[in-house]
Amino acid sequence: MHIKKTGSGKNAIFMDCGIHAREWISPAFCQWFVKEAVSTYGSDPQMTSLLDQMDVYVLPVINIDGYQYTHTSNRMWRKTRSRKSGTSCIGADPNRNFNAGWCTLGASSNPCSDTFCGYSPESEIEVKNVADFIRKNKGIIKAYLTIHSYSQLLLFPYSYTYELAADHSELMKVAEGASSALRSLYGTRYTSGPGATTIYPAAGGSDDWAYDLGVKYSYTFELRDTGRYGFLLPESQIQPTCEETMLAVKYIAAYVQKNIY
């Protein structure tokens, strides 16, 4: 989905949801964002300014086959649904399949594992298509946001190494500002930091890959909650989660708008 106002050659933000099939609150947020963008343009000054100056690409469900499978067969399915002759195990973890420290830390080479890295970087068609699109548009994409659940975290590179990113202090400052904006609505507390030390080391993630490609403002959101419901977040929490997350995304977008590189 490409949200744009008239004008060509604008810089852009790319946001995706639904990399992991069972994280249902994630696609809900991408849809909420699109609804807010198109319905508040012209009345909300921040959204109006953002869309006047930048384009936003939104991919509501990356892992569409996995997402459908969680609705029909196995609610807790995580991976893609790709098949390979020689094994009865299905799918790879798309967030271990990007070419960023591929299949080193925190990823498995066992096709039956939930964190299987795939048979090669970008072996999964969903990952290849996203990577191709971002590569093709890397001259204009200035921020990459990927939405997951759960844990209430705002993460940035790196996850494939314990080394700090070159832009660590700026990325941390922006993450803390975004977390503060999110907390202002319902008091929901997020922790900010690099993936490896804040949640766990994990190679092959999309945020690390985008950052190494040159997309400086690269963030992973882990939405509500912290484990009480986990992936089975109740329907009553969908709207408040989306509302508060919107504040954090708008904070990052406004910062990127003012700090184009």
Image (spheres, rainbow, N blue to C red):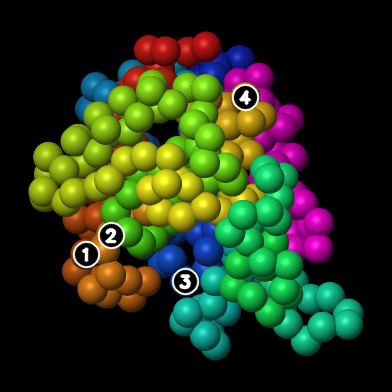
Which label's residue is closer to the chain start, 4 or 1? 4
Of the numbered discs 4 and 2, the one sitting upstream in the chain is: 4
Q: State yes or no: residue 217 in magenta.
A: no
Q: Which mark is residue 237?
A: 1
Q: Residues within 10 Å of mark 1 (few under 14, many from 20)?
A: few
From mark 2 to mark 3, how far is it between C-alphas?
A: 13 Å
- Report the mark closest to the observer, 3 or 1: 3
Res. 188 mark: none
Identify the residue shown where x is 35% and y is 29%: 172
| Disc number lying in front (4 or 1) | 4
Q: Distance between the residues labelled 2 and 1?
A: 8 Å
| Segment colored magenta | 118-141
Residue 200 position (above or below residue 229)? above
Residues packed near mark 2 inside 10 Å, few (<14), some (14 to 19) or many (20 plus) = many
Name the residue beneath numbered marker 2. Answer: 224
Give the residue number, with chain letter if any, for mark 4: 214
Which structural element holds mark 3?
loop
Callout 4 amino acid: Gly
Q: Which of marks 3 and 1 is nearer the N terminus?
A: 3
CB under 8 Å between discs 2 and 1: yes
Q: Identify the residue under disc 3.
A: 22
Residue 193 lies left or right of residue 237; in this view the side is right
Residue 7 percent coordinates (x, y): 54, 15
Q: Are marks 4 and 1 in contact (CB under 8 Å)?
A: no
